[in-house]
Amino acid sequence: MKNPGSYALYKVKKGKLDQWLAWCETVDTSRRQEAAATLDEEGLEYEFFTTFKLSNGWYAMGASINDSSKGGGEVDRARPINREHAFQKRDCLEPVHRGDFSYFLAADERAT
């Protein structure tokens, strides 16, 4: 199976944890349908972020799983949700690393 996704690791900027978590809560609740509607345009099946603490501070990692039936897509920068998401990431997060998954397994690949 072709590696179907990618990830990005960020360090949460000092003093920005509450703002970032509030934005994540907004995406996950009141703007969930609006955010999910962008996945088709971007050729994604899933997108998620997780926020966690290490000994030297708070980090966030976002990952996406491509939808192979849709092909790749582009982020529509005219959509308000996409503009707000980009702003929150710039304002709250420092990029650390981007990459592809080291491996990706799917249940339908099990030997029978």
Image (tube, rainbow, N blue to C red):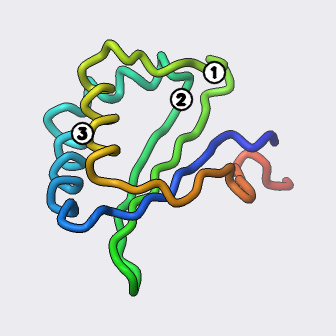
In the rendered structure, the answer to whether residue 109 lies left or right of residue 96 reads: right
Q: What residue is rendered at 61% in x and 33% in y?
A: 66
Look at label 3 and name its amino acid. Answer: Val
In the rendered structure, which disc, 3 or 1, sits on the residue that comes first in sequence?
3
Element under disc 2:
strand
In the rendered structure, which disc, 2 or 1, sits on the residue that comes first in sequence?
2
Residue 43 position in % (x across, y down): 56, 22
Q: Which residue is mark 1?
A: 72
Mark 2 near mark 3, Cβ–Cβ under 8 Å?
no
Q: Which residue is mark 2?
A: 44
**Residue sticking out furthest to the right:** 111
Look at label 1 and name its amino acid. Answer: Gly
The answer to whether 42 is drawn above or below residue 11 in the figure is above
In the rendered structure, which disc, 2 or 3, sits on the residue that comes first in sequence?
3
Q: Which residue is mark 3?
A: 27
Q: Nearer the viewer, mark 2 or mark 1?
A: 1
In the rendered structure, the answer to whether residue 9 lies left or right of residue 38 reads: right
The image quarter in which residue 51 lies: bottom left
The image quarter in which residue 88 lies: top left
In the rendered structure, the answer to whether residue 19 lies left or right of residue 92 reads: left
